[in-house]
Image (cartoon, helix red, strand yellow):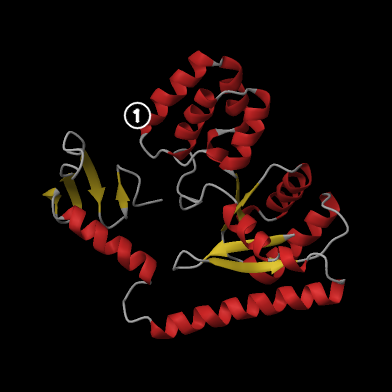
Amino acid sequence: MMAVCKSANNKIVPVVFVLVDEEIFSSWKWFLKCLKEFVIQNRKTCIISNRHLGILSAIDMMLEQFPNMGMHRFCLEHIKANIAGKFPGQKLRSLYQRVGFTLNATKCVKAWEKLANKSPATAQCLDSIGANKWTILGDGGNRWVVVTTNASESYNNALKGARLLPIIALIKSSLLKTVKLFNDNYEKIEKCQTILTPHYMAKYNKWMLCGMRHKVTVFSKHSQLYEVVTGPHDNRPWKGRKTQEVQFGAGICTCLKWQT
């Protein structure tokens, strides 16, 4: 079992890993209790996982016991795999992927209507899961646009070579790889010369260039309320020119990208 998160530079950071006899409710309950006590503590945290019955039961128990611990969301890739097993079809798959990934309410509604018309049973199955559990739009910004557990899968793959080792050697090998990862990241932090991390500095520069084509109208300086009309796209001039309302002080934009 393991838990990972993303660093400020969008890199995988292993938080905790543990060896258990099997993945069942009792082992997940113990794992999550340790995660809460030693790592999460009083931080409000969004946990993203697959829908393994042991995980679901253990997280439900933890959230009932510690309601301020955070929230639980599902990996969209696992949702897609589960639904595809029951209702196969590439067109269906692309529709519920569009519903899950988009931040645009209009696009989400259109894709959902197409999905419901094409396969009412699929729409009913997804609806029973709850939009807040698997869609970005319904999430409320809690998962910060992280829609899958790919980060944990990637780190799990990095540790694959140690799986056939004896227990003590396996633990030591995993520990040394994790220590090396942290040391490498510390070296990168010490060499960083920008205000933001390299990943987000690149994004900032890209957004700055994009923002120079936007038109901004001040509605209220006191309330820090602005209207922003986006400029046309470089390669698709028919796109863009969308009007958004920005509440700067609250960090809110009607495009939803800021708060997620």
**Foreground residue, 175 or 224?**
175
Instruction: Give the residue at mark 1.
Output: 106
Q: Is residue 59 visible?
A: yes
Q: Nearer the viewer, residue 89 or 35?
A: 89
Q: Position of residue 44 (x, y in %)?
A: 56, 59
| Residue 102 position within the rendered picture, expressed as x and y whole percent measured from the top left | 41, 38
Q: Nearer the viewer, residue 245 or 156?
A: 156
Residue 223 visible somewhere in the drawing: no
Q: Image check: 242 left or right of 116?
A: left
Q: Quadrant of residue 106?
A: top left
> In percent of the image, x 77 and y 42: which residue is there?
53
Type of amino acid under label 1: Thr
Q: Which residue is drawn at the image coordinates 43% and 85% (left, top)?
A: 190
Indicate left or right for 161 with 234 as reference. Answer: right
Q: Does residue 180 appear to the left or right of 221 in the view shown?
A: right
Can you say whether 208 is above or below 16 in the image? above
In the displayed structure, 170 sits above or below 127; it is below
Q: Which image quadrant for residue 130?
A: top right
Residue positioned 25% across, 63% down in the render = 205
On screen, 33 above or below 197? Answer: above
Give left or right: position of 22 versus 186: right
SS assignment at label 1: helix
Determine the residue positioned at 19% across, 58% down: 209
Q: Where 236 sits versus 162, above or below? A: above
Image x and y of residue 242, in percent? 20, 38
- Horizontal and vertical percent for residue 231? 15, 44
Q: Quadrant of the N terminus?
A: bottom right
